[in-house]
Image: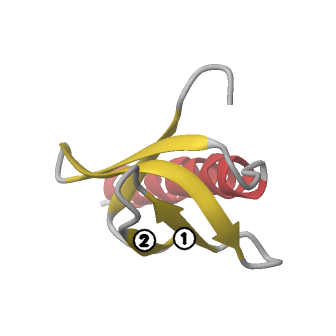
């Protein structure tokens, strides 16, 4: 039972660290940055950051044909920034 508590505690610290990295990534985004958003390991949307909220938790990504999608940091997506953005 003690081991189970340690595992949960370690898991919480790891997820907290992952969220901190995710928040830093999202806060570093600027308008025009090229990104790819994946959902369940598959590409969901790809384009450039069109806008973001002041707190960096919500972004709008517009693709090359003009389709614009709102993505929130708490969505079950992964965000990848293209090199050189």
| x and y, in percent, of residue 57 in the image | 65, 73
The residue under the point 59% across, 20% down is 83
Q: Is residue 65 visible?
A: yes
- Decide if residue 10 is in sight here: no
Q: Earlier in the sequence, mark 1 or mark 2?
A: 1
What x and y, as percent, mark residue 74?
Answer: 47, 74
The quarter in which the N terminus is drawn is bottom left
Q: Residue at x 40, y 49 (%)?
A: 64
Residue 19 location in percent, x, y?
59, 57
x, y percent for residue 46: 37, 47
Residue topped by disc 1: 60
Specify the quadrant of the image occupied by residue 27. Answer: bottom right
What is the secondary structure assignment of the residue under circle 2? strand
| 83 sits to left or right of 71 | right
**Label 2 neighbourhood size at 10 Å, few (<14), some (14-19), many (20+)?**
some
The residue sitting at 68% across, 31% down in the picture is 85
User: Which SS class for mark 1?
Assistant: strand
Tell me whether the residue at label 1 lies in contact with that at label 2, contact meaning CB atoms closer than 8 angstroms: yes
Side of 2 relative to 14 (left or right): left
Question: In the image, which disc is placed on residue 68?
Answer: 2
Quarter of the rendering containing residue 53: bottom right
**60 vs 37: above or below:** below
Q: Residue at x 41, y 64 (%)?
A: 66
- Direction right: furthest residue: 54
Of residue 54 and residue 1, the one placed in the foreground of this image is 54
């Amino acid at each position: 039972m003690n081991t189970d508590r340690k595992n949960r505690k370690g898991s919480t610290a790891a997820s907290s660290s992952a969220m901190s990295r995710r928040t830093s990534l999202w806060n570093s985004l600027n308008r025009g940055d090229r990104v790819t958003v994946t959902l369940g390991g598959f590409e969901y949307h790809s384009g450039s950051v069109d806008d973001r909220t002041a707190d960096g938790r919500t972004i709008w990504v517009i693709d090359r044909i003009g389709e614009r999608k709102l993505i929130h940091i708490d969505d079950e997506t992964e965000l990848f920034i293209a090199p050189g953005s």
